[in-house]
Amino acid sequence: MRMLQRRMTAVQADKLHYYLQAQSGIRKVTVSERTMDVTILYNEKEETRGAVIQALSDFGYERTEVEVPAHTGRELSRTYEDKLFFLVVSRALRRILLPVPFRRLYCLGKAARYICEGLNCLRRGRMEVPVLDATTIAVSILRRDYSTAGSVMFLLDMGSLLEEWTHKKSVDDLARRMYLNVDRAWVKTAENDEVLMAVDQIRPGDCIVVRTGNIIPLDGHVQAGEGAVNQASMTGESLPVAKSEGAYVYAGTVLEEGELEIRVEKALGSGRYDKIVNMIEESEKLKSSTESRAAHLADSLVPWSLGGTALAWLLTRNATRALSFLMVDFSCALKLAMPISVLSAMRECSDHHINVKGGKFLEAVAQADTIVFDKTGTLTNATPSVRRVITFGGGEEKEMLRLAACLEEHFPHSIANAVVREAQERQIIHEERHAKVEYVVAHGIASSIDGVRALIGSYHFIFEDEKCRLPEGEDEREKFDNLPDDCSLLYLALGGELAAVICIEDPIREEALRVVDMLHGEGFTRVVMMTGDSHRTAASVAARLGMDEFYSEVLPEDKATFIRREHEAGRKVVMIGDGINDSPALSEADAGIAIAAGAAIAREIADITISADDLRELLVLRRLSTALMARIDGNYRRIMTFNGGLIGLGLLGMMPPARAALLHNISTIYFSIDSMKNLL
C-alpha cells in the first residue's frame, strides 16, 4: 500500500508504524519513508482486514495520538543510507566530469590523509593496519597507478562507513531494547503518603524516596535523610560516598545503606538512553579472552604482512604481486566481526528477556561447570503466598498482617511481596505509622511503630540477634512448637515479644526440576542450592529437584566463601539469585545472574539479568553463550583462511591488487553482517 502524500518524514513514518503496530490482529508492519510504501502482515480473518482498513481511514498525523519511543533507529539508518549514496554518486561523478589531471590531484590530496595516519602510527611505535593502508596507497601512486590507489581509498572509505553503520546499528538495537525496561519508584505526595509510580511518569520537582538496596532512578538533590551511595557506575569510585541533605545524586547509582528523599532535577529522557549506550560501549571493553586473542593476533600480523610484501618483491621482482600482498590484511575483519558478534549475541539475549553486560560474561557462562542457586524466589516461585498468620500474645491476625505489610512494602523481595499482596487481597489498608526503617541484610527489618520497637525477619534475627522472647503461657509454647515445616517462616516481634509468625507457601517452580536436569545435559557437572532456610526444608527441596549438593542456614558471606573455594579448585562458577543477601555471591562469581523481579542492588551488581517468568531462560543463555564462542572461533578460522587465500592468489599473479582489495573489503562486510544473524 502507498500513502497518498508527496513526502514522508522519519517522524511521520515512525508515527504510522507504531500506530499500526498497536492495532489488534496486525503481526508486522514495515513503513518506508522514502517510497511512502506500507506493508502490513495481519491475521487471515475477514474482520481483521476490515479493522485494518478502518484503522487506516481513521489515521491522521496531526489528530492521532500515538506513543512513539524517543529512539527508533530510523533516523540512524537514514543518515547512513544518505552517506553511502553520496559516497558512490560522488565517485561516479568525478570519473565522468573531472579531467584526468584533476582526478590525479584529488587522488594525491586524499592519499595524504591515509599516509599521515600511517606515519603517525609508526611515530607511536605501533605497526597496525593504517601502516598497511598507507604503504599500499603510496606504492600505487609511486608506480603512477592512480586508478588502483583511488579504488583502494574508495573501498576503504566504503568499508569504514559500512563498519561504522553496522556497529552503531548493533549498539542502537541493543540500547533501545534496554531503554524500554522502565523501573518504578516511590513518590512522596503533598499529604506525605508514598505512591508507587513508573519512572517515566515522574517529573522534575517531584520527591522520590529511595531505601537501602535500591537504584536511584533519576538525578536530583537530597531533600532529607542520609545514606551511602555506590557511584561506581558513574564515577568509577569503588567505595560508597556519604550523601546527606543538599547533596546531588545520579540516576543509575545504588543506595547501599540508609534512606534518602530526593527532589528530582531531570525527568527520564535521552540522558538515560545515552547512559545505556555508554554502558554498552564500555561493556565491549569486557571482551572475552577468545575475542581479545583474535584482535591481538590481527595487530601482530601487520609486521608479517609488510615482511611478506618485501619478500614477495625480492623473490619475484614483480611490484604487482607484492602489492597484492599489501591489499589484504586480517585486522579489519577480525576487529569488526568479533565485537559485532558479541553485540549481536547481547541483542539476541535481550530478545529472550536476558540483559548481559559484556562478552566476558557470556564466555564465563559458556565455560562454567558449576551453577549455584539461591532458593527463595529463584528455584521457588517469584510469587509465594501467605498460607496462614499465627498470632501470639493475644494479637489480632488482621492487625499483625497490617503491621507486617507496612514494614515489608519498602524492600522488594519475593517474601516481602507476598506479605504486601496478602494484605491487599484482604483489603487491609496499611498506613505509614512507623519511624525510619532499617534493613539488616539477610536478617530482617527494624523500625518503631507508635513508639514500640518492631522487628520482622528470620528466627536467627528475632531470637538470637535481637533476644526477643515468647509470650508467657503453655498455649503460646505449643503453637510455637507446632509451626509448619513445609513453609518459610517470617517472625514479627513487638516490644521484644513475638507477636506473630507468617507462614509463607513457597512452591517450587513448575519448570525447575526439568531445568536442573537439562543444565546437567548442557555440561554443568555440579548444580548447587544454597539457602537461609532450615536444613529440613532445604533437604526436601534439594531432593525433589535432583541437586548435586545443598547448603542450608547460610549467610551471604557463606555463599561468597563457597564460590571462592570453587575458584581455588579451578572451577568456573555461575551464581543466580534475587535478593540483597545474594549480592556478595553474585559479585564473586565468574558470572552473576540476577532475577529481574528481585532487589535492585542485586540487578546492579549482577553481570546478567533474566526475567522472573521462566528459569528455562538459563538454558537459552547457556546455548547462546556456547554458540557465541563457536561463532567467534569460526569467524577466526574463516577470516584467516579466506584472506590467506587472497594473499596466495596475489603472490601467484592470479589476482590484481584492486580485485584483492575489493574482495577483502567485501569479505569484511560479509563476515560482519553474518555475525549479526541470530545464534539460535
Image: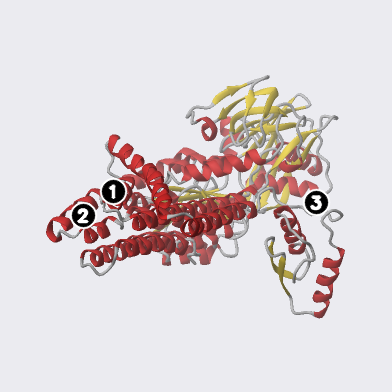
* Closer to us: 575 or 16: 16
Label 1 element class: helix
Q: Residues within 10 Å of mark 3 (few under 14, many from 20)?
A: few
Rendered image: mark on residue 647: none
Q: Quadrant of residue 625?
A: bottom left
**Which badge, 1 or 2, comes first in the chain's sequence?**
1
* Closer to us: 314 or 125: 314
- Between the residue at mark 1 and the residue at mark 2, the CA separation in whole angstroms equals 10 Å
Q: Identify the residue under disc 2.
A: 309
- Whether residue 148 is visible here, answered yes or no, is yes
Relative vertical location of residue 158 with respect to residue 436 in this rendering, above or below: below
Q: Position of residue 613 (x, y in %)?
A: 62, 58
Q: Quadrant of the N terminus?
A: bottom right
- Between the residue at mark 3 and the residue at mark 1, the CA separation in whole angstroms equals 75 Å
* Closer to us: 630 or 391: 630
Label 3 element class: helix
Q: Position of residue 283 (x, y in %)?
A: 47, 45
**Which badge, 2 or 3, comes first in the chain's sequence?**
2
Would residue 479 appear left or right of 300 to someone viewing this image? right
Q: Identify the residue under disc 3.
A: 425
- Amino acid type indicated by mark 3: Glu
Q: Identify the residue under disc 1.
A: 135
- Between the residue at mark 2 and the residue at mark 3, the CA separation in whole angstroms equals 78 Å
At 69% from the left and 60% from the top, the residue drawn is: 33
Which tag is nearer the camera, tag 2 or tag 3? 2
**Which badge, 3 or 1, comes first in the chain's sequence?**
1
At 63% from the left and 49% from the top, the residue drawn is: 597
Label 2 element class: helix
Q: Quadrant of residue 371?
A: bottom left
